[in-house]
Amino acid sequence: MAGRRTPAGGFTILELVVVLAVLALVVALAAPRFARGIQAAALDSTARELLAGLKYTRSHAVSEHDEAVFYLNLEDRWFRLPGSDRRHGVPENLDMELVTVESERDGEVGGAIRFFPDGSSTGGRVSLVVGERKRHVDVDWMGGRVRILDES
């Protein structure tokens, strides 16, 4: 029995290579799904942030008994709330479009949605798109109601 070797406890190189290949395949197949999930989360999060900003602007107009303006810069990808100089950024991977009345347009750069002391507004829509997914943040002109419309 002196010439006989006992097998060592462990894995062969071939077994390790097979396991690594399977793991690489799983990661390669799963990565695009995770990326789409992250993009969808950014889309939803930004839509909710715009919704909150527009609702704040409406509340500001009503409580201050004065007009309040929500400004969106499409070129540099930010929006601003009334009474603040802070610019809230919009993720680079989202395409944006603003529909508002001509008097509130700022050329191709962006524009505004204006709210009045009675809660009404000039109305408008901010559309966000990533891939095939779309979210529209609508502002009703008559009542100033702000809501998110899903178009996936």
Image (spheres, rainbow, N blue to C red):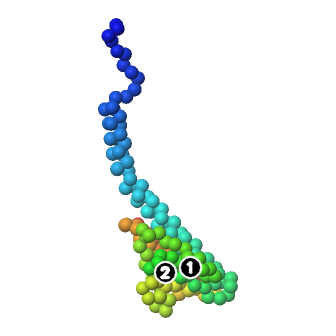
Is residue 151 at least partly visible in the picture? no
In x, y percent, where is residue 56?
A: 61, 77
Please name the amino acid that badge 2 sits on: Asn
Three-letter amino acid code of the residue under disc 1: Arg
Residue picked out by circle 2: 73
**Residue 127 horizontal/vertical position (percent):** 44, 75
Q: Secondary structure beneath disc 1?
A: strand
Q: Residue 31, which numbered label?
A: none
Residue at numbered disc 1: 80
Write the residue at 45% across / 84% down. Answer: 109
Which quarter of the image is occupied by the N terminus?
top left
Looking at the picture, tell me which residue is in the foreground, 2 or 24. Answer: 2
Query: Do the CB atoms of the residues marked 1 and 2 lie less than 8 Å apart?
Result: yes
Residue drawn 47% across the image and 78% down it? 76
The disc, 1 or 2, on the residue closer to the chain's N-terminal end is 2
State left or right for residue 21 relative to residue 138: left
- Residue at the spot 47% in from the left edge and 83% down from the top edge: 110
- Rendered position, 30 above or below 9: below
Expressed as whole percent of the image width and height from the top left, the position of residue 101 reads 47, 89
Quadrant in which residue 151 is drawn: bottom left
| Callout 2: SS | strand
Q: Quarter-wise, where is residue 142 in the image?
A: bottom right
Residue 148 point in image, percent of width and height: 50, 72
Q: Nearer the viewer, residue 83 or 137?
A: 83
Q: Is residue 19 above or below residue 57?
A: above
